[in-house]
Image (cartoon, rainbow, N blue to C red):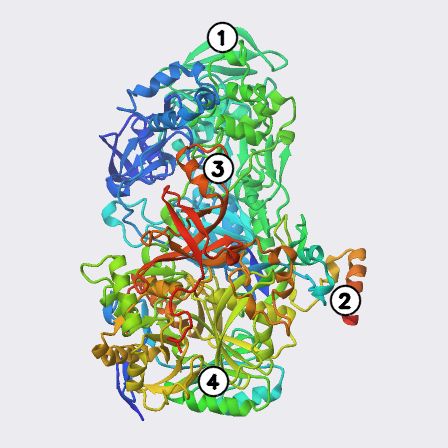
């Protein structure tokens, strides 16, 4: 039974929360520019890492807000909790991942 | 335009009979202990005004508008409530952009109108949910132990004190709990879950000695 | 005084004799006894029979590790099977009986199995009853009847149970030397503490300890620490409480037993309390379990662990025998030897180590123990109790024994094969263990939790080392919470301990002159009769993983979960595989630590409290009208209202007829309602529904279909424009919470720029749906401030008005196809208005109807129910609502709905169905055959290949107003197949011919509802 640090309400028991899947799935700006295979990839294909995983959780029995959780799928440690509009915490990323994330963010700004 | 008769859970206002969700339960069982002997005293506080307020906590215009309309400061600290003794108005923090105003029954129309007027062009909202909730006070020396049987929140005196509130689970339903003093606590529960929660409270409090006021 | 109760010593209360029954015999013991110590005091070793061979089983241990001493405790509805006598406190009037024996433990018919044991190897049942496969069901019943330990009560459990949440800064598990020291340190450092221990009295091993601590007896030291802890209001102590599970993020469950030590008449309140503890820091001090020795017939009653013997003597003043052999491979056991000597027993020590040297050995020898070094016990002899120990010298390499045998007459064999730290809780959340080559045991290594293991559960077996380590562990836990906290132990328990540097040598399986297969059975799991030979057999048959061997041999599956013999078993496996013990590894330690009652798991979650029952304001009224109930989500909805003589068919026929002829009322309060406000509310609705909402004017209502992002229908309902930037959305009853979450998710994560606020008002409004040609007359009679003329108050609009004095919102929407006024009333006033409606309707034979009739009349109109006609894979096109798709806007699911396969005309589509014979009501879920001729195959089972199906019936009823049955179904390409006749078959083999038709049966133009 996890204990999760809701960014708004503080440390609360897992029973107050629901996990709603992988975080940072970027919805395509123009869905119609994608073929069916690409669109299906957006809809359904999720990563399933052994180790660090980024997830969306909702504090469903509390403030009802969604937020992001960086969780280790092996040890079940929660490495970070951050707001839904914030990027992956830099301290958890390798240099490559950080560079990659920066690229994604700048392309979002352009779009 | 005043109340004519009032029992705890059934009353007539303006020729219309009101029934709280606990109208049958409160009448059916008064507990297994006298008020003096009971470790837990339960009482329904029916028919209050419940206004759900949404707005931007960072916007001073919003905060001022609420204060002006209902006389209570908006609590911006999570899991706290503000109470105004003069009006009996309470505002509880629910989320960073959501609060629950609890007030006497009579003031619903006036408060709703005052809030709407105060909000003007702001992106803020008020929703009347007065009939969607009821409140139960849980008093007595075992009140906190009773809550601890059902909620994962730490409700010990050290961690849940006067002015604190928390939305969480109690048994298997969502509630808003509040702490008034060491031995006076309470919950706000949705109407349709109220009977279930009441039965759970009665069941779980029986070994403390429970009295229904 | 029995011959086995010592005249003095121990901490039992000799002033409080207690009488109890075992197998019908009345015996006596003292307060402070366990059932096991009391039985031993009465000379009763034989307790039960083993699972497979029905061999005699006696008390072997002193606590949770004992797999043998299982009894059926109590009688009637409170009887509990397989309770460990070693953990059962004696109380006056206790009644216990042996398990797994018939007719009695002394004469057990099934004991014949032990003489056939060569024919019953590991996997015997799998191998023997495999052919023919069909016959397994026959054999299974008979095997199960002869197996099983104990009996469960036939009656409901009369006791109550409950759960309690607890938050602790420091939780200490175990109140032995290390645990007490840890709690002492943490409390002196100012932390808030929860200390739990599974025994009645704090102290653990100190209760049987003869050495001194801090210049006082170990017992007095334990009491002094307890007194200090109890004096501190920040310390909570739970006794008779076992930490049974350690879960993520320092969440532990503890079961507190409040009744089982009391006579039935003294029991009050809840029997067991399950504590759900969240601790900031955890100190594990659970102690260690002694290992047995694995030699021939090591399971005979009269065989006890050496440490248990010491406890029985020192704590309970009971000697388990008079003439003993103590068989050991370690120095620790010599303290047991001295306890036995002090109790006046004769002791022959058999030490497998030729080179054993330790001060304790010298002490024991000085006190009169005869010590044989380099010898082993190869076999025990006896029927229901040990009579002889066969002792042989090890060969110099230690891998065999010389031929010469000594036979020693004994009534007790005390065994010590070394100690296993209780790493169970440490391991529950994935904590790693490390093999210690010197201590010959697994010790705790890293853990993902904020915890520390101290004392013997950390492999620190020396008493004084344990206290120091416990104190340091408790202090460091407190310091993690408050870095400036300090605490002093106040004394140094011992600078140099005489019990320090204790050694152990490996002796996992005693060598024999014969091959293991030809040797007398040497048991590893006493409860399941798993022998060393069974483990070797498993290896020969190809099972190499420890987890597979466990499942093949049943080793560790007993109620002790392998606490007694598993490490020996793994070592024997390692040897058979020619690999090391760490390479072989352990099986997984999982919660629960000890067997736990179902009651503790359930708590108060029973009967009406099992799941919330949501009630509408009219619930009591429905009850008084004799309504039957349908569960919709957590709601109770009135299903139908039968008269005394009516079944469901008759009741719904009456209810649905009167809707069409007069007027009938439905409690629709359970529908989800979401208040939507904000300048972007219309845009938001446009994005979540497939049809347009921007042009919806204040006062008007519109039906909408909502898709999920994958393009499938997730909900439907009517949304009303209450005013500028203010809407009220209704959802299905079951979908309310999911829809609100879906909308919030999109608002919070994808569209944070939209200025919209959502609030559930489901409970605020009650809905009284008045349906039928007379509905207007009734509502009009109760409401004088609304113009009911259909020009002023048209279909799909609403008016605010006062109904029977209550401020209401009246909506002209219809789910019955008839003229309908839905009165939405603030819920506290709902009963008032509901009663007024029925009073006003008396002249029109107004009738309540429930969800079953609601289903019938909406099916007559072809209205879908999300979740009945749809199943998460239906699109709006599939149900015939493709025309609602707006091409002018983007909305959730739009892109997905354009995927090629979602547009296929061959998809299953919603159609109506009528039976060709005009009479048969098809079963919901019945299949529609692709080829009508396949009907013939249904009678020639078994099928050679699956019959092809085109779809299934989703709704099916008899329609009184139509005079024939109607159905809705999803059929491949169904929208192009109206008029076609198909065969329909259900799972009971009923077959009927039906004609595909349009989904609307009644009032095709929709004039009535307008």
- Residue C84 is left or right of residue C296, and the answer is left
Residue contact at pointers 2 and 4, CB within 8 angstroms:
no
Q: Identify the residue position indicated by label 4 in the image.
A: C699
Provide the chain ID for the residue under circle 3.
C
Residue contact at pointers 4 and 1, CB within 8 angstroms:
no
Q: Identify the residue position indicated by label 2 in the image.
A: A105
The answer to whether C374 is drawn above or below residue B17 in the figure is: above
Cα gap from disc 3 to disc 2, whole angstroms: 69 Å
Image coordinates for residue C954, horizontal then vertical, percent: 43, 55
Image coordinates for residue C504, horizontal then vertical, percent: 58, 27
Give the structural element (helix, strand or loop) at label 2: helix
Q: Identify the residue position indicated by label 3 in the image.
A: C211
Instruction: Say if labels 2 and 4 share a chain.
Output: no
Residue contact at pointers 2 and 1, CB within 8 angstroms:
no
Q: Quadrant of residue C107?
A: top left
Q: Quadrant of the N terminus of chain C?
A: top left
Q: Nearer the viewer, mark 3 or mark 2?
A: 2
- Residue B23 is left or right of residue B127, and the answer is left
């Amino acid at each position: 039974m996890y204990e999760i640090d809701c960014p708004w309400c503080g440390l609360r028991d897992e029973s107050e929360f629901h996990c709603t899947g992988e975080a940072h799935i970027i919805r395509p700006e123009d869905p119609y520019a994608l073929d069916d295979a690409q669109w299906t990839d957006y809809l359904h294909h999720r990563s399933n890492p052994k180790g660090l995983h980024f997830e969306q959780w909702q504090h469903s029995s509390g403030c009802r807000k969604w937020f992001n959780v960086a969780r280790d799928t092996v040890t079940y440690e929660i490495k970070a909790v951050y707001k839904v509009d914030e990027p992956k915490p830099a301290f958890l990323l390798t240099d490559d991942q950080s560079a990659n994330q920066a690229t994604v963010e700048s392309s979002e700004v352009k779009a | 335009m005043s109340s004519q008769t009032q029992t705890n859970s059934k009353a007539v206002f303006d020729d219309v009979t009101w029934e709280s969700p606990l109208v049958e339960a409160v009448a059916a069982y008064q507990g297994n202990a006298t008020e003096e002997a009971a470790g837990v005293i339960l009482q329904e506080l029916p028919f209050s005004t419940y206004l759900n307020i949404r707005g931007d906590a960072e916007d001073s215009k919003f905060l001022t508008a609420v204060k002006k309309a209902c006389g209570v400061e908006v609590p911006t600290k999570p899991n706290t409530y503000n109470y105004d003794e003069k009006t009996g108005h309470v505002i509880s923090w629910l989320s960073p952009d959501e609060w629950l105003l609890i007030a006497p029954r009579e003031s619903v129309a006036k408060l709703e109108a005052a809030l709407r007027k105060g909000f003007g062009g702001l992106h803020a909202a008020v929703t009347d949910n007065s009939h969607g909730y009821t409140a139960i006070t849980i008093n007595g020396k075992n009140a906190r132990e009773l809550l601890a049987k059902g909620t994962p929140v730490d409700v010990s005196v050290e961690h849940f004190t006067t002015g604190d509130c928390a939305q969480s689970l109690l048994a298997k339903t969502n509630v808003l709990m509040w702490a008034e003093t060491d031995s006076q606590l309470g919950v706000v529960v949705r109407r349709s879950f109220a009977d279930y929660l009441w039965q759970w409270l009665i069941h779980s409090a029986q070994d403390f000695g429970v009295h229904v006021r | 005084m029995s011959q086995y109760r010592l005249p003095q010593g121990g901490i039992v209360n000799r002033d409080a004799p207690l009488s109890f029954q075992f197998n019908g015999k009345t015996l006596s013991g003292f307060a402070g006894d366990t059932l096991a110590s009391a039985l031993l005091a009465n000379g009763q070793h034989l307790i039960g029979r083993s699972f497979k061979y029905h061999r005699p089983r006696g008390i072997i241990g002193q606590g949770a590790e004992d797999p043998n001493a299982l009894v059926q405790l109590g009688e009637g509805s409170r009887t509990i099977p397989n309770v460990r006598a070693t953990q059962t406190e004696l109380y006056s009037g206790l009644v216990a009986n042996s398990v797994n024996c018939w007719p009695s433990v002394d004469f057990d018919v099934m004991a014949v199995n032990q003489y056939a044991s060569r024919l019953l190897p590991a996997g015997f049942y799998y191998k023997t009853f495999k052919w023919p496969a069909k016959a397994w069901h026959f054999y299974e019943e008979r095997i199960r009847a002869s197996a099983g330990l104990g009996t469960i009560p036939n009656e409901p459990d009369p006791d109550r149970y409950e759960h309690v949440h607890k938050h602790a800064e420091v939780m200490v598990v175990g109140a032995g030397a290390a645990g007490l020291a840890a709690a002492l340190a943490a409390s002196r450092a100012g932390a808030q503490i929860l200390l739990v221990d599974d025994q009645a009295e704090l102290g653990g091993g100190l209760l049987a300890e003869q050495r001194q601590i801090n210049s006082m007896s170990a017992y007095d030291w334990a009491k002094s620490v307890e007194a200090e802890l109890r004096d501190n209001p920040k310390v909570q102590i739970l006794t008779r409480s076992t930490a049974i599970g350690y879960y993520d993020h320092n969440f532990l469950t503890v079961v507190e037993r409040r009744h089982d030590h009391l006579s039935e008449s003294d029991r009050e309140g809840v029997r067991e309390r399950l504590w759900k503890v969240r601790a900031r820091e955890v100190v594990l001090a659970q102690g260690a379990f002694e290992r047995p020795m694995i030699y021939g017939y090591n399971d005979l009653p009269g065989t006890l662990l050496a440490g248990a013997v010491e406890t029985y003597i020192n704590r309970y003043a009971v000697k388990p025998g008079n003439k003993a052999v103590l068989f050991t491979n370690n120095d620790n056991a010599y303290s047991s030897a001295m306890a036995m000597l002090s109790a006046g027993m004769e002791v022959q020590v058999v030490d497998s180590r030729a080179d054993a040297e330790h001060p304790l050995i010298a002490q024991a020898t000085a006190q009169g123990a005869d010590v044989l070094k380099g010898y082993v016990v190869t076999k025990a002899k006896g029927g229901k109790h040990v009579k002889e120990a066969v002792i042989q010298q090890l060969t110099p390499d230690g891998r065999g024994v010389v031929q010469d045998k000594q036979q020693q007459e004994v009534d007790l064999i005390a065994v010590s094969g070394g100690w296993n730290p209780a790493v169970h809780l440490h391991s529950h959340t994935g904590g790693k263990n490390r093999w210690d080559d010197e201590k010959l045991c697994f010790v705790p290594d890293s853990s993902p939790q904020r915890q520390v293991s101290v004392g013997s559960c950390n492999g620190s077996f020396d008493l004084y080392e344990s206290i120091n380590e416990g104190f340091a562990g408790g202090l460091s836990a407190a310091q993690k919470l408050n870095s400036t906290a300090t605490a002093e132990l106040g004394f140094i328990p011992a600078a140099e301990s005489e019990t320090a540097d204790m050694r152990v040598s490996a002796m996992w399986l005693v060598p024999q002159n014969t091959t293991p297969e030809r040797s007398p059975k040497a048991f590893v799991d006493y409860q399941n009769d798993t022998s060393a030979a069974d483990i070797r057999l498993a290896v020969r048959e190809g099972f190499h993983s420890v987890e597979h061997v466990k499942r093949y041999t049943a080793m560790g599956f007993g109620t002790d979960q392998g606490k007694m013999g598993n490490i020996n078993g793994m070592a024997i496996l390692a040897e058979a595989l020619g690999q090391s013990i760490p390479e072989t590894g352990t099986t997984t330690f999982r919660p629960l630590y000890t067997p736990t009652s179902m009651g503790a798991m359930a708590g108060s979650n029973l009967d009406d409290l099992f799941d919330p029952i949501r009630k509408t304001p009219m619930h009591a009224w429905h009850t008084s009208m004799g309504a039957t109930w349908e569960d919709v989500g957590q709601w109770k909805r009135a299903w139908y209202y039968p008269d005394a003589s009516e079944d469901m068919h008759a009741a719904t026929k009456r209810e649905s007829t009167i809707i069409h002829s007069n007027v009938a009322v439905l409690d629709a309060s359970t529908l989800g309602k979401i208040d939507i406000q904000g300048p972007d509310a219309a845009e938001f609705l446009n994005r979540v529904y497939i049809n347009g909402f921007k042009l919806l004017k204040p006062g008007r209502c519109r039906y909408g279909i909502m898709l999920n992002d994958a393009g499938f229908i997730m909900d439907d309902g009517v949304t009303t424009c209450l005013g500028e930037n203010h809407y009220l959305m209704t959802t299905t009853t079951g979908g309310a919470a999911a829809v609100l979450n879906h909308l919030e998710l999109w608002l919070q994560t994808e569209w944070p720029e939209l200025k919209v606020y959502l609030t559930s008002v489901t409970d605020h409004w009650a809905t009284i749906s008045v349906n039928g040609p007379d509905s207007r007359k009734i509502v009009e009679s109760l409401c004088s401030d609304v113009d009911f003329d259909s020009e002023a108050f048209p279909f799909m609009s609403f008016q605010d008005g006062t109904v029977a004095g209550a401020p209401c919102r009246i909506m002209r929407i219809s789910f019955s196809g008839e003229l309908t006024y839905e009165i939405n009333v603030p819920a506290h006033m709902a009963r008032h208005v509901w009663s007024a409606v029925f009073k006003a309707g008396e002249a029109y034979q107004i009738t309540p109807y429930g969800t079953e009739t609601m289903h019938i009349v909406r099916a007559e109109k072809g209205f879908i129910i999300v979740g009945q006609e749809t199943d998460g894979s239906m699109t709006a096109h599939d149900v015939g609502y493709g025309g609602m798709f707006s091409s002018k806007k983007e909305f959730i699911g739009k892109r997905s709905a354009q995927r090629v396969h979602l547009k296929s005309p061959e998809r299953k589509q919603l159609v109506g169905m009528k039976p060709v014979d005009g009479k048969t009501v098809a079963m919901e879920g019945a299949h529609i055959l692709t080829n009508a001729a396949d009907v013939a195959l249904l009678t020639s089972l078994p099928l050679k290949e699956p019959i092809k199906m085109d779809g299934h019936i989703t709704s099916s009823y008899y329609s009184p107003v139509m005079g024939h049955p109607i159905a809705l179904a999803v059929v491949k390409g169904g929208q192009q197949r109206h008029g076609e006749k198909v065969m329909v078959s259900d799972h009971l083999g009923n077959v009927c011919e039906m004609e595909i038709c349009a989904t609307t049966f009644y009032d095709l133009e929709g004039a009535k509802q307008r």
